[in-house]
Amino acid sequence: MGCGQSTASAGKVSSAGQTHPVQDTSPPQVVRQVPANAVNRPASVNSHLPDPTSHAPKDATKPKKDLDRIATARHKRQSDAAKELIDMANRNLPKTEQLKINPKTESQDTLLLNATAGVFLFNQLPIDVQRALVDVMYFDEFQDQTLVINEGEVNPNQQRLFVIKSGKIELYQHLAGDDEEEDVVITSWSGGDQVKLTASLGAEDCFGEDALLYNKKDMTALSVGKTEAWILDQRSYNAIKFAHSKKTEREKKKLIATVQSFGTLSDEQLTKVLDALDVIGS
């Protein structure tokens, strides 16, 4: 029986006793020729190829502990620089007007830095100046329907920037009697004047930044429900900005002193060089 199976696999027998070959209909097999020197090739032959991680960001290959240590060191350096600015500002202020650092949690500190990043008075400043301004911000809360800012009021001691922690603030502008505007309202606090709602603000929004530059207020801010906010006053802002300018001038002079060719310049020429220099902070 086994022999019969072997004969049948070799060919087909006709009724006349003749054997005819069977046509193979299976797909042809492709045999790949593998170079002998490629068999069992050691992994070291690919050592000339570029490491796929070589183009990763520099910090991406650092252990997390190293990144945390770097971030902590950077934060400490910036905080120390901010404290130095506040100390410098206090040297030019009377004892009754000394700036005070108001402690904040790490999350509060981050919130205030992020919230003020979009304010034009902040986003062009070095990070140590931003941190100094955040450090002196103080906390306050307002009950429902409190006039946080009263448009037209002139009071240098009340020129303040606000960052909302919680609650809601509505901003209004007074309109002249002949102005034709939509959505005009008359409220009890407006003294019968027409006012228009221009914005509704919530947590992490800022308002009042123009008051840090000008004494006259160009809008009214009304609290809706209990509202909490962090506040920066104009006096603190100006004092820290002035301290920063003095520190920058000192650093420029120190840099110029190391360049021999500047030694022959007149005071007027040195002043022009100082004005043209930009000191890059870390």
Image: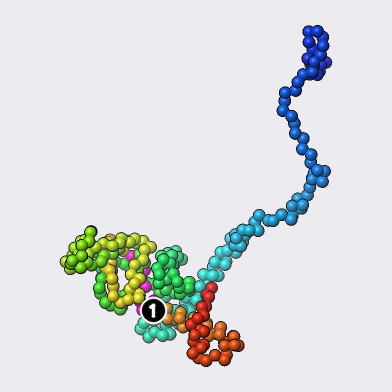
Magenta stretch containing residue 58, yes or no? no
Identity of the residue drawn at 81% across and 14% down = 19
Q: Is residue 282 above or below residue 114?
A: below
Identity of the residue drawn at 39% across and 84% down = 93
124 left or right of 210?
Answer: right
Q: Nearer the viewer, residue 79 or 255?
A: 255
Q: Would residue 189 be visible to someone looking at this image?
A: no
Q: Is residue 176 above or below residue 85?
A: above
Q: Quadrant of residue 200?
A: bottom left
Farthest residue in the top direction? 16
- Measured from the top left, where is residue 254 in percent x and y? 55, 85
13 left or right of 150?
Answer: right
Magenta stretch containing residue 237, yes or no? yes
Q: Would residue 276 be visible to someone looking at this image?
A: yes
- Measured from the top left, where is residue 183 in percent x and y? 23, 59
143 left or right of 232?
Answer: left
Identity of the residue drawn at 44% across and 79% down = 86
- Pick the quarter of the image with the N terminus: top right
Q: Quadrant of residue 12?
A: top right
- Pointer 1: residues within 10 angstroms few (<14), some, or many (20+)? some
Look at mark 1 in the image and give the residue it sits on.
238
Q: Nearer the viewer, residue 208 or 37?
A: 37
* Residue type, numbered disc 1: Asn
Q: Quadrant of residue 25?
A: top right
Please give the range of residues in magenta. Answer: 228-239
- Measured from the top left, where is residue 110 in percent x and y? 45, 65
